[in-house]
Image (spheres, helix red, strand yellow):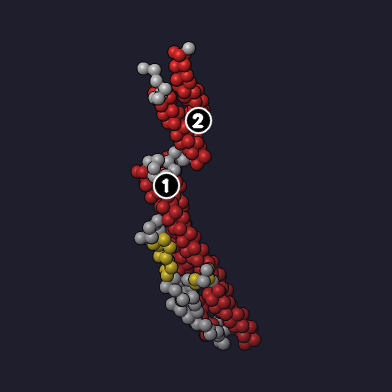
Amino acid sequence: MATINTNAGAMVALQNLNQTNRDLETVQSRINTGLAISSAKDNGGIYAIAQKMRSDVAGYGAVRNSLDLAQSTTDVALAAGEAISDLLVEMKEKALAASDTSLDTASRTALNEDFKALRDQISTITSNAEFNGTNLINGTVTSISALANADGSNTITISDANLTLGGGTVTVAATASFSSAGDAATMVTTIETSLDNLNASLAKLGTASKSLEVHKGFVGKLSDALEKGIGNLVDADLAKESARLQSLQVKQQLGVQALSIANSAPSTILGYFR
């Protein structure tokens, strides 16, 4: 039936053109964002999975920061402990020299002054060996903790090492000195005990710092794996999208022409009345 009220061909052509335009918008969006799934309406299930993985990646970023902070605090304490160990070695040398019974009083007094200067340097180190306000070697904290996983349910704890004078590790008193060969000999024994204790504490701090470093490396690899997984789920294949874009642009032009032809079809009815 020839009619000017209903143009079925134009309706079909318009529907096809609208679908082509929608497909073209989708492809352009993928090219602009680089994502095949950029919102929940694209694919709700995949979008939810990707968002959960993004949350974990963000969490691991906080974990790395926490591990960096704990490792830096531990490394400062370790460096201070090594410096104290060197000072104790020098103090032992002074005390051992002063324990020589053939030494005159003036020489022993000079050695004692050097000894006290080294002793006071230990106090200076222990009071200043802090990072971000935390000091692991002056007895102000018992331990520090670092986040170990993305939801904060696991932590890595680093115990303190009290290296202050007269403490359980460095048993040399804060007022230690010697005035005789016998005092100096006794001090040598005390320093040797302190060195043994300090070496054990340094070993623990070193192991703790290494464990933080290893876990930070693992967290970095885990975060990278998650980011790769997110990309596999939501990233667009731009090579394919580029080819599809060109195809849809041609299809759009053909659709416009088809609609133009369909719209011109009713004009043929005029020929019936000539």
- Looking at the image, which residue is at 46% across and 76% down? 140
**Residue 147, relative to residue 243: is it above or below?**
below
Q: Position of residue 244 (x, y in %)?
A: 48, 29
Which structural element holds mark 1? Answer: helix
Camera-side residue: 92 or 4? 4
Residue visible at 42% across and 65% down?
A: 145
Q: How crowded is mark 1: few (under 14 residues within 10 Å), some or many (20 or more)?
A: some
**Disc number lying in front (2 or 1):** 2
Q: Which amino acid does label 2 sit on?
A: Leu
Q: Name the residue under label 2.
A: 245
Q: In this view, does 220 lie above or below 105?
A: above
Looking at the image, the residue that sits furthest to the front is 273
Residue at 50%, 66% (x, y): give it: 73
**Residue type at the position of mark 1:** Leu
Query: Crowding at label 2, few (<14), some or many (≥20) Cα neighbours within 10 Å?
Result: many
Q: Position of residue 245 (x, y in %)?
A: 50, 30
- Residue 166 in view, yes or no: yes
On the image, the x and y values in percent for residue 253 come to 51, 25
Which badge, 2 or 1, is on the more N-terminal residue?
A: 1
Residue placed most toward the observer, 85 or 51 = 51
Residue marked by disc 1 = 226
Q: Which residue is drawn at 44% across and 38% down?
A: 36
